[in-house]
Protein backbone atom coordinates (compact mmCIF):
# COMPACT_ATOMS: atom_id res chain seq x y z
CA UNK A 1 0.00 0.00 0.00
CA UNK A 2 1.44 3.43 -0.91
CA UNK A 3 2.27 5.83 1.91
CA UNK A 4 -0.34 8.32 2.97
CA UNK A 5 0.12 11.54 0.98
CA UNK A 6 1.47 14.59 2.74
CA UNK A 7 -0.08 17.17 0.42
CA UNK A 8 -3.80 16.78 -0.21
CA UNK A 9 -5.38 20.21 -0.52
CA UNK A 10 -9.16 20.27 -0.68
CA UNK A 11 -9.64 23.14 1.80
CA UNK A 12 -8.14 26.17 0.07
CA UNK A 13 -7.73 29.59 1.70
CA UNK A 14 -7.45 32.70 -0.46
CA UNK A 15 -5.79 35.41 1.65
CA UNK A 16 -7.31 38.82 0.88
CA UNK A 17 -6.39 42.36 1.88
CA UNK A 18 -6.51 45.78 0.18
CA UNK A 19 -4.19 45.98 -2.80
CA UNK A 20 -4.46 42.42 -4.14
CA UNK A 21 -4.94 41.91 -7.88
CA UNK A 22 -8.39 41.11 -9.18
CA UNK A 23 -6.92 38.88 -11.90
CA UNK A 24 -5.20 36.60 -9.39
CA UNK A 25 -8.36 36.40 -7.30
CA UNK A 26 -10.19 35.30 -10.45
CA UNK A 27 -7.58 32.66 -11.26
CA UNK A 28 -7.71 31.15 -7.78
CA UNK A 29 -11.51 31.17 -7.87
CA UNK A 30 -11.65 29.61 -11.33
CA UNK A 31 -9.30 26.77 -10.41
CA UNK A 32 -10.60 25.89 -6.93
CA UNK A 33 -13.97 27.63 -6.70
CA UNK A 34 -15.92 25.88 -9.48
CA UNK A 35 -17.72 22.57 -8.93
CA UNK A 36 -16.39 20.15 -11.55
CA UNK A 37 -17.22 16.92 -9.77
CA UNK A 38 -19.21 15.85 -12.85
CA UNK A 39 -15.83 15.64 -14.61
CA UNK A 40 -14.15 13.71 -11.82
CA UNK A 41 -12.44 16.69 -10.22
CA UNK A 42 -12.46 16.74 -6.40
CA UNK A 43 -14.86 19.14 -4.70
CA UNK A 44 -12.74 21.95 -3.25
CA UNK A 45 -13.76 24.14 -0.35
CA UNK A 46 -12.38 27.56 -1.31
CA UNK A 47 -12.75 30.35 1.25
CA UNK A 48 -11.95 34.04 0.98
CA UNK A 49 -10.19 34.88 4.24
CA UNK A 50 -9.36 38.31 5.60
CA UNK A 51 -8.61 40.11 8.84
CA UNK A 52 -12.20 41.34 9.06
CA UNK A 53 -15.45 40.85 7.11
CA UNK A 54 -15.51 44.29 5.47
CA UNK A 55 -15.60 44.23 1.63
CA UNK A 56 -12.15 44.66 0.08
CA UNK A 57 -11.91 47.08 -2.87
CA UNK A 58 -10.16 45.79 -5.97
CA UNK A 59 -8.93 47.71 -8.97
CA UNK A 60 -11.47 48.30 -11.73
CA UNK A 61 -14.43 49.09 -9.49
CA UNK A 62 -14.63 45.54 -8.13
CA UNK A 63 -14.76 44.34 -4.55
CA UNK A 64 -14.27 41.07 -2.72
CA UNK A 65 -16.43 39.98 0.21
CA UNK A 66 -14.55 37.75 2.67
CA UNK A 67 -16.50 34.76 3.95
CA UNK A 68 -14.07 33.67 6.66
CA UNK A 69 -11.62 35.34 9.01
CA UNK A 70 -7.92 34.52 9.07
CA UNK A 71 -8.64 31.98 11.81
CA UNK A 72 -9.84 29.64 9.03
CA UNK A 73 -6.22 29.26 7.89
CA UNK A 74 -5.65 26.95 10.86
CA UNK A 75 -7.68 24.24 9.11
CA UNK A 76 -6.69 24.98 5.53
CA UNK A 77 -4.80 22.43 3.44
CA UNK A 78 -3.37 25.07 1.11
CA UNK A 79 -3.07 28.86 1.35
CA UNK A 80 -2.88 30.99 -1.79
CA UNK A 81 -1.80 34.64 -1.77
CA UNK A 82 -2.73 36.79 -4.79
CA UNK A 83 -0.35 39.27 -6.36
CA UNK A 84 -0.47 43.01 -5.75
CA UNK A 85 -1.34 46.03 -7.86
CA UNK A 86 1.43 47.96 -6.13
CA UNK A 87 4.11 45.41 -5.39
CA UNK A 88 5.44 47.29 -2.36
CA UNK A 89 2.02 47.43 -0.68
CA UNK A 90 2.53 46.44 2.96
CA UNK A 91 0.30 43.59 4.02
CA UNK A 92 -1.63 44.08 7.27
CA UNK A 93 0.24 42.70 10.25
CA UNK A 94 -2.59 40.23 11.08
CA UNK A 95 -2.15 38.74 7.60
CA UNK A 96 1.61 38.41 8.03
CA UNK A 97 1.18 36.84 11.46
CA UNK A 98 -1.39 34.37 10.12
CA UNK A 99 0.95 33.37 7.28
CA UNK A 100 3.83 32.85 9.70
CA UNK A 101 1.71 30.66 11.97
CA UNK A 102 0.47 28.62 9.01
CA UNK A 103 4.01 28.08 7.77
CA UNK A 104 5.09 26.97 11.24
CA UNK A 105 2.26 24.40 11.16
CA UNK A 106 3.59 23.11 7.84
CA UNK A 107 0.70 24.30 5.68
CA UNK A 108 1.74 24.72 2.02
CA UNK A 109 1.63 28.39 0.96
CA UNK A 110 1.60 29.58 -2.65
CA UNK A 111 1.99 33.13 -3.92
CA UNK A 112 1.07 34.31 -7.39
CA UNK A 113 3.28 36.88 -9.13
CA UNK A 114 3.86 39.84 -6.77
CA UNK A 115 2.44 37.83 -3.89
CA UNK A 116 6.08 36.87 -3.36
CA UNK A 117 6.54 40.34 -1.85
CA UNK A 118 3.89 39.53 0.76
CA UNK A 119 5.61 36.27 1.67
CA UNK A 120 8.92 38.12 1.82
CA UNK A 121 7.39 40.70 4.19
CA UNK A 122 6.36 37.81 6.43
CA UNK A 123 9.93 36.49 6.37
CA UNK A 124 8.85 33.24 4.75
CA UNK A 125 11.29 33.61 1.86
CA UNK A 126 14.37 34.42 3.92
CA UNK A 127 17.14 32.08 2.83
CA UNK A 128 14.88 30.53 0.18
CA UNK A 129 14.60 30.65 -3.57
CA UNK A 130 11.65 32.51 -5.03
CA UNK A 131 10.39 33.74 -8.36
CA UNK A 132 8.22 36.65 -9.39
CA UNK A 133 7.43 38.49 -12.61
CA UNK A 134 10.61 39.00 -14.62
CA UNK A 135 10.12 42.77 -14.48
CA UNK A 136 10.06 42.67 -10.65
CA UNK A 137 13.13 40.54 -9.93
CA UNK A 138 15.42 43.50 -9.24
CA UNK A 139 12.78 45.14 -7.04
CA UNK A 140 12.37 41.96 -4.99
CA UNK A 141 16.16 41.60 -4.64
CA UNK A 142 16.53 45.22 -3.57
CA UNK A 143 13.81 45.25 -0.94
CA UNK A 144 14.33 41.70 0.31
CA UNK A 145 18.03 40.83 -0.06
CA UNK A 146 17.58 37.71 2.12
CA UNK A 147 15.63 36.12 -0.76
CA UNK A 148 17.42 34.22 -3.53
CA UNK A 149 15.49 35.44 -6.58
CA UNK A 150 15.45 33.04 -9.52
CA UNK A 151 15.06 35.13 -12.66
CA UNK A 152 13.58 32.77 -15.22
CA UNK A 153 11.38 30.04 -13.68
CA UNK A 154 7.63 30.02 -14.31
CA UNK A 155 7.12 28.78 -10.76
CA UNK A 156 9.12 26.97 -8.13
CA UNK A 157 8.93 25.39 -4.71
CA UNK A 158 11.36 25.82 -1.83
CA UNK A 159 10.45 23.84 1.25
CA UNK A 160 6.67 24.21 1.61
CA UNK A 161 6.48 27.60 -0.11
CA UNK A 162 5.56 28.12 -3.76
CA UNK A 163 6.04 31.26 -5.84
CA UNK A 164 5.24 31.99 -9.47
CA UNK A 165 6.02 34.46 -12.21
CA UNK A 166 3.54 36.93 -13.63
CA UNK A 167 -0.08 36.58 -14.74
CA UNK A 168 -0.35 33.38 -16.81
CA UNK A 169 2.33 31.70 -14.68
CA UNK A 170 -0.07 31.99 -11.77
CA UNK A 171 -2.44 29.75 -13.72
CA UNK A 172 0.46 27.37 -14.34
CA UNK A 173 1.21 27.16 -10.63
CA UNK A 174 -2.42 26.64 -9.60
CA UNK A 175 -2.85 23.83 -12.13
CA UNK A 176 0.46 22.31 -11.03
CA UNK A 177 -0.71 22.26 -7.42
CA UNK A 178 -3.89 20.47 -8.49
CA UNK A 179 -1.88 18.03 -10.62
CA UNK A 180 0.56 17.32 -7.81
CA UNK A 181 -2.18 16.61 -5.29
CA UNK A 182 -4.94 15.06 -7.39
CA UNK A 183 -3.42 13.81 -10.62
CA UNK A 184 -2.80 14.93 -14.17
CA UNK A 185 -6.36 14.17 -15.28
CA UNK A 186 -7.91 16.45 -12.65
CA UNK A 187 -5.62 19.30 -13.69
CA UNK A 188 -6.32 18.62 -17.36
CA UNK A 189 -10.09 18.71 -16.76
CA UNK A 190 -9.78 22.11 -15.10
CA UNK A 191 -7.45 23.36 -17.84
CA UNK A 192 -9.85 22.25 -20.56
CA UNK A 193 -12.72 24.13 -18.96
CA UNK A 194 -10.48 27.22 -18.73
CA UNK A 195 -9.37 26.74 -22.37
CA UNK A 196 -5.73 26.78 -21.36
CA UNK A 197 -2.83 24.35 -21.47
CA UNK A 198 -2.61 21.98 -18.48
CA UNK A 199 1.10 22.74 -18.30
CA UNK A 200 3.68 24.73 -20.19
CA UNK A 201 7.30 23.84 -20.70
CA UNK A 202 10.12 26.32 -20.65
CA UNK A 203 10.88 29.29 -18.44
CA UNK A 204 10.36 33.04 -18.35
CA UNK A 205 13.38 33.21 -20.62
CA UNK A 206 11.08 32.69 -23.57
CA UNK A 207 9.44 36.00 -22.64
CA UNK A 208 12.48 37.92 -21.42
CA UNK A 209 15.48 37.22 -23.57
CA UNK A 210 14.38 35.71 -26.82
CA UNK A 211 12.85 37.48 -29.79
CA UNK A 212 9.99 36.10 -31.80
CA UNK A 213 11.26 33.65 -34.47
CA UNK A 214 12.41 35.46 -37.57
CA UNK A 215 9.56 34.33 -39.79
CA UNK A 216 6.17 32.78 -39.43
CA UNK A 217 7.45 29.98 -41.62
CA UNK A 218 10.01 29.03 -39.01
CA UNK A 219 7.37 29.03 -36.27
CA UNK A 220 5.02 26.87 -38.34
CA UNK A 221 7.84 24.49 -39.22
CA UNK A 222 8.86 24.06 -35.61
CA UNK A 223 5.24 23.48 -34.58
CA UNK A 224 4.98 20.76 -37.22
CA UNK A 225 8.17 19.13 -35.95
CA UNK A 226 6.86 19.15 -32.39
CA UNK A 227 3.57 17.64 -33.55
CA UNK A 228 5.48 14.91 -35.37
CA UNK A 229 7.58 14.11 -32.31
CA UNK A 230 4.46 13.90 -30.11
CA UNK A 231 2.81 11.41 -32.45
CA UNK A 232 6.00 9.33 -32.70
CA UNK A 233 7.21 9.37 -29.10
CA UNK A 234 8.14 5.69 -29.19
CA UNK A 235 10.77 6.40 -31.81
CA UNK A 236 14.25 7.68 -30.96
CA UNK A 237 14.75 11.35 -31.85
CA UNK A 238 17.98 13.28 -32.04
CA UNK A 239 18.38 16.99 -32.56
CA UNK A 240 19.96 16.23 -35.91
CA UNK A 241 16.93 14.15 -36.98
CA UNK A 242 14.44 16.81 -35.90
CA UNK A 243 16.52 19.54 -37.51
CA UNK A 244 16.56 17.64 -40.80
CA UNK A 245 12.77 17.35 -40.67
CA UNK A 246 12.61 21.14 -40.18
CA UNK A 247 15.05 21.72 -43.03
CA UNK A 248 17.56 23.42 -40.72
CA UNK A 249 21.04 22.76 -39.48
CA UNK A 250 21.12 21.26 -35.95
CA UNK A 251 22.61 24.46 -34.55
CA UNK A 252 20.03 26.73 -36.19
CA UNK A 253 17.20 24.36 -35.22
CA UNK A 254 18.27 24.31 -31.56
CA UNK A 255 18.52 28.11 -31.50
CA UNK A 256 15.08 28.65 -33.06
CA UNK A 257 13.53 25.92 -30.92
CA UNK A 258 14.73 27.53 -27.69
CA UNK A 259 13.61 30.97 -28.90
CA UNK A 260 10.12 29.57 -29.48
CA UNK A 261 9.68 27.33 -26.43
CA UNK A 262 12.20 28.56 -23.88
CA UNK A 263 13.81 25.15 -23.59
CA UNK A 264 16.04 22.83 -25.58
CA UNK A 265 14.68 20.20 -27.97
CA UNK A 266 15.84 17.31 -25.78
CA UNK A 267 14.49 18.79 -22.56
CA UNK A 268 11.17 19.45 -24.29
CA UNK A 269 11.09 15.88 -25.55
CA UNK A 270 11.79 14.46 -22.09
CA UNK A 271 8.96 16.55 -20.63
CA UNK A 272 6.53 15.24 -23.25
CA UNK A 273 7.63 11.65 -22.67
CA UNK A 274 7.12 11.99 -18.94
CA UNK A 275 3.64 13.42 -19.49
CA UNK A 276 2.74 10.56 -21.84
CA UNK A 277 4.06 8.00 -19.38
CA UNK A 278 2.00 9.56 -16.59
CA UNK A 279 -1.17 9.11 -18.64
CA UNK A 280 -0.39 5.47 -19.42
CA UNK A 281 0.40 4.75 -15.76
CA UNK A 282 -2.89 6.35 -14.70
CA UNK A 283 -5.13 4.85 -17.37
CA UNK A 284 -3.69 1.43 -18.21
CA UNK A 285 -2.27 -1.72 -16.65
CA UNK A 286 0.58 -1.93 -19.16
CA UNK A 287 3.80 -3.33 -17.67
CA UNK A 288 6.39 -0.69 -16.88
CA UNK A 289 8.79 -1.84 -19.63
CA UNK A 290 5.97 -1.43 -22.19
CA UNK A 291 5.14 2.03 -20.87
CA UNK A 292 8.80 2.95 -21.23
CA UNK A 293 8.87 1.57 -24.79
CA UNK A 294 5.72 3.37 -25.92
CA UNK A 295 6.87 6.71 -24.56
CA UNK A 296 10.35 6.52 -26.03
CA UNK A 297 12.38 5.99 -22.89
CA UNK A 298 13.55 2.66 -24.22
CA UNK A 299 13.96 0.98 -20.85
CA UNK A 300 12.27 0.97 -17.49
CA UNK A 301 15.55 2.03 -15.88
CA UNK A 302 15.78 5.17 -18.01
CA UNK A 303 12.14 6.03 -17.35
CA UNK A 304 12.67 5.54 -13.62
CA UNK A 305 15.68 7.86 -13.66
CA UNK A 306 13.70 10.64 -15.36
CA UNK A 307 10.74 10.23 -13.00
CA UNK A 308 13.10 10.54 -10.04
CA UNK A 309 14.71 13.66 -11.48
CA UNK A 310 11.56 15.47 -12.61
CA UNK A 311 8.78 14.14 -10.35
CA UNK A 312 10.69 13.00 -7.26
CA UNK A 313 8.96 9.62 -7.40
CA UNK A 314 9.16 6.33 -9.31
CA UNK A 315 6.82 5.11 -12.07
CA UNK A 316 5.66 2.30 -9.80
CA UNK A 317 4.82 4.63 -6.90
CA UNK A 318 3.17 7.08 -9.30
CA UNK A 319 0.91 4.32 -10.61
CA UNK A 320 0.01 3.21 -7.08
CA UNK A 321 -0.99 6.77 -6.22
CA UNK A 322 -2.88 7.64 -9.40
CA UNK A 323 -4.22 4.55 -11.14
CA UNK A 324 -7.98 4.12 -11.36
CA UNK A 325 -9.73 1.17 -9.78
CA UNK A 326 -12.94 -0.35 -11.17
CA UNK A 327 -15.87 1.97 -10.62
CA UNK A 328 -13.79 5.12 -10.35
CA UNK A 329 -14.58 7.98 -12.73
CA UNK A 330 -12.18 8.50 -15.60
CA UNK A 331 -10.50 11.42 -13.85
CA UNK A 332 -8.41 9.98 -11.04
CA UNK A 333 -8.72 11.81 -7.74
CA UNK A 334 -5.74 10.10 -6.13
CA UNK A 335 -3.11 12.23 -4.49
CA UNK A 336 0.64 12.35 -4.42
CA UNK A 337 3.09 14.28 -2.29
CA UNK A 338 5.08 16.84 -4.27
Image: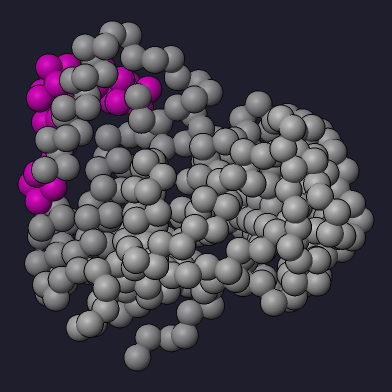
Q: Residue furthest top?
A: 215
- 251 within the magenta span: yes
Report if residue 173 is visible in the image.
no
Q: Answer left or right for 35 relative to 136.
A: left
Q: Looking at the picture, how far across and down is residue 99, in whole percent?
A: 78, 62
The residues colored magenta run 232-259
Q: Position of residue 252 (x, y in %)?
A: 26, 17
Query: Which quadrant of the figure contains the N terminus?
Result: bottom left
- Please say which color scheme the image uses: one colour
The one nearer the camera, 180 or 203, is: 180
Task: Judge from the rendering whether residue 206 lies leftward or rightward of residue 184; answer left or right.
Answer: right
Q: Residue at x 61, y 63 (%)?
A: 46
Which image quarter: residue 145? top right
Per the picture, the main secondary structure of the magenta-coloured stretch is: helix
Q: Position of residue 172 (x, y in %)?
A: 48, 46
Tell me what residue is drawn at x 27 percent, y 62 percent: 278
Q: Residue at x 22, y 27 (%)?
A: 223
Tell me: residue 195, above or below residue 284: above
In the displayed image of the protein, which residue is found farthest to the bottom?
A: 1
Amino acid sequence: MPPRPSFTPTRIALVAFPGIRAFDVSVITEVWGVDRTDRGVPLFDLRRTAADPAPIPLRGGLSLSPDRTLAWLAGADLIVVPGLDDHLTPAPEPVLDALRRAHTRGTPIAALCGGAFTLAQAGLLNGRQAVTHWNLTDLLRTHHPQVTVVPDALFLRDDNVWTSAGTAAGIDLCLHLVRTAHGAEAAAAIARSMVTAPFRTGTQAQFIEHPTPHTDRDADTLAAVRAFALTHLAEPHTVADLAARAGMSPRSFARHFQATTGTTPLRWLITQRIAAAQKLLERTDLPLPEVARRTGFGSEITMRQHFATHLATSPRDYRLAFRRTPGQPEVDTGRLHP
